[in-house]
Image: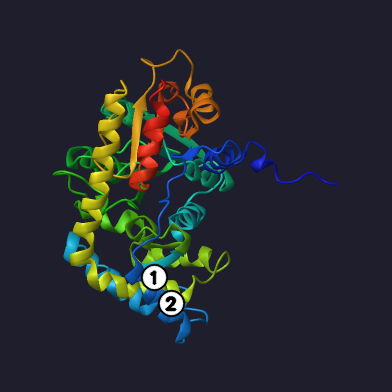
Amino acid sequence: MKSTATRIETFKESIFATMSKLALENKAINLSQGFPDFEGPEWIRKIAAEKIMHGSNQYAPYPGSVNLRQNLQTLYKKNYHLDYDWNSEISISVGATEAIYSIITAVVNPGDEVVVFEPFYDSYQASIIMAGGTIKPVTLKAPDFHFDENELKKAISSKTKMIIVNTPHNPTGKMFSKKELEIVAQLAIENDLYVLSDEVYEYLTFDDHKHIPIATLPQMKERTFTVSSAGKTLGLTGWKIGWVCTSATLSTKFRMVRQFTSFSVATPFQEAVAEAMNSFDTYIPEFQKQYKEKRDYFYAGLIELGFKPNKPEGTYFIMCPIENKTSKNDVDYAMELIVDKKVAAIPPSVFYAVSDEGKKYLRFCFAKKHSTLSDALTNLKSL
């Protein structure tokens, strides 16, 4: 047979799928892949059941449910003073991952370069490669995961088309400060670049940290694709309801790609998310409180076991240095934990393209039941 596409020859199975499979095979507690091991709120699931039973089962408009887009318009204006037109500037996608793929496909030409902060969500690199582009990594430097402004400037060339920002940041739990976002914004404006801002953990913030969409900065709304998702906020990752907010012109480009991929997104889940958003004023504070308790419990447990974890400002991940526990790299140590301690974590070196810093860490997901986190800490005690 003839060969398949050469552009995907470097692709491997996602680390999330690999570690979850190994966790299952070894009967290990899965703190690797980023999803809860408990159901999302019952009241939201009941709304979805009602939508399924009462007429929301045919194709939604390919830009997305009118109700959902209108509620998103209201939320962005209320939360961030961002005024997006629901009809021309807000589009629904099959989760954030499809949104990211479609944006990059719509913007990046073969030979274009895309600046990405590492460690990065692995779909960024895959989407850039499939578009024929080249990734230009800028390392977030431990322990606080800051970036070097000069390094960022050097990464930008005449071939650069886009910068990807992820805040709150997976896997580090870092939230980009306003000053950092201003640096990115200024360089985007000076070099006429697009910005893809992945904000799927926008509501999952802790302590006094406030999420700042880069689109709120001067001259940034028109050049920014703001991406978010209901999966993380509602604890319903299987629903795959994401969205993109951007200018009408860029929305049209994005929609042209999406209409030839998934076309439409599950109608009853779109309508359920739209209705759930009417209760965000009461839901979000409880959601944040629930996850803060999980973060604090697991963080304290790791400290008691002699680890020196980074305390995340957002997301439901903890990056944990391992150098004081082992001489092994992250991949080998993660395998040891799965086989010997029955706890699965992500080795974050797969999220780096140039730096070796990821080899010194593991990433744990604490979006789990209290009993799951407790059992994991018990299993790790023998370390």
Q: Secondary structure at mark 1?
A: helix
Query: Which residue sits furthest right?
Result: 1
Camera-nearest residue between 308 and 7: 308
Q: Answer with the quarter of the image where residue 22 lies.
A: top right
Residue 275: percent from the left, percent from the top? Answer: 31, 75
Camera-nearest residue between 325 and 125: 325
Work out whether 327 lies above or below 176: above
Q: Secondary structure at mark 2?
A: helix
Decide if residue 135 is on the left or right side of residue 291.
right
The type of residue carrying mark 2 is Ala
- Are the residues flagged by discs 2 and 1 in contact, CB closer than 8 Å? yes
What is the C-alpha distance between the residues marked 2 and 1? 6 Å
The mark found on residue 45 in the picture is 1
Q: Residue at x 38, y 25 (%)?
A: 381
Residue 251: percent from the left, percent from the top? Answer: 40, 65
The type of residue carrying mark 1 is Arg
Q: Residue at x 25, y 28 (%)?
A: 144
Q: Residue at x 23, y 52 (%)?
A: 288
Q: Is residue 89 visible?
A: no
Residue 184: percent from the left, percent from the top? Answer: 27, 40
The mark found on residue 273 in the picture is none
Query: Which residue sits furthest bottom?
Result: 54
Decide if residue 129 is on the left or right side of residue 71.
right
Camera-nearest residue between 89 and 339: 339
Decide if residue 245 is on the left or right side of residue 214.
right
Camera-nearest residue between 35 and 72: 35
Residue 317: percent from the left, percent from the top? Answer: 35, 40
Q: Residues within 10 Å of mark 1 (few under 14, many from 20)?
A: some
Work out whether 184 lies above or below 274: above
Query: Which residue sits furthest left?
Result: 208
* Quadrant of the image containing the C terminus: top left
| Residue wearing tag 2 | 49
